[in-house]
Amino acid sequence: MAQNKDKPAYRLFNSKGIAVSYGKMLEELKRAEVVLFGEQHNDPIAHWLQLELTKGLHQAKQQSFAIGAEMFEADVQLVLDEFIVGQVPEKNFEQESRPWPNYATDYRPIIRYAKEQGIPVIATNVPRRYAAMVSGGGLVTLEDVSEEAKKYIAPLPVTVDMELPAYKNMMAMFGGGTHGNTKSQNIVQAQALKDATMAYFILGQVQQGKQVLHFNGAYHSDNFEGIGWYLKQEQPQLKMLTITTVLQEDLGKLSDENINKADFILVVPASMTRTF
């Protein structure tokens, strides 16, 4: 009779694996200065919950609320601002902001809500051309970029802790073992550049008194590493909370490997339809 059971589209757990309600999570998130929402990029439930959280936190914070997004690179901030305040048509904004291929289904509802409500949206990611430079030749390649280029990058030099588990795993993934070869180290440095740059632009909003709800791929914030590590290096007392998105066959309990992955774990059925 398993077919007759209720079929929840998601469940929420805290870091210890205790089930929590959306309302309880929202109340806790309201007290944070930064919320890092780690998504699976093609997960419809995560994108819907991002929109709902945007509404809930904005209602609580009003003018002291901002959205940050990995999906936009820092050098498109101008056209993003122009769209949010209603100066440029949506068509031009979408042509010129280099949105991801799944923008229309997954991010446009959030950006449109931000425009309706006048919520600042911050393009936090490093322009991919600089990430590509680092991926090819390491962080040293950024030493000669122009002052103009440096506006879109975390302040140099960027420190990279190659002992962080996420970075060690990446090195192993790219064939360099846990200590890496030059190629795998460069790839990790490019990842770290993205993490550091996103943290830098998030903190810029925090310093203006804004609570930031930031959307990023889960790998950039899982296990309180990545963006979170760079945020804490700069501001150890920062009140930061994280969410991650995971897939499980069984939503009844949190799998052991997902315990402590974030402050809140959004569990979605493994059979969930993907957006791409």
Image (cartoon, rainbow, N blue to C red):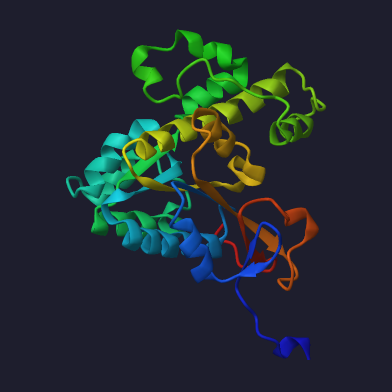
| Viewer-side residue, 130 vs 69 | 69
Q: Is residue 49 visible?
A: no
Q: Position of residue 221 (x, y in %)?
A: 59, 43
Occupied quadrant, residue 246: bottom right
Residue 271 versus residue 151 in the image, above or below: below
Give the residue furthest to the front. Answer: 237
Q: Is residue 61 visible?
A: yes
**Residue at (69% x, 21% y) in the render:** 185
Give the residue furthest to the right. Answer: 177
62 sits to left or right of 69: left
**Residue at (54% x, 50% y) in the render:** 241
**Residue at (82% x, 27% y) in the render:** 177
Q: Position of residue 229 (x, y in %)?
A: 59, 34
**Residue at (78% x, 54% y) in the render:** 257
| Viewer-side residue, 53 vs 69 | 53
Q: Position of residue 1 (x, y in %)?
A: 78, 91
Q: Position of residue 147 (x, y in %)?
A: 36, 13
| Viewer-side residue, 44 vs 114 | 114
Give the residue furthest to the top. Answer: 144
Residue 126 versus residue 4 in the image, above or below: above
107 sits to left or right of 272: left
- The count of marks equals 0
Quadrant containing the C terminus in the rendered view: bottom right
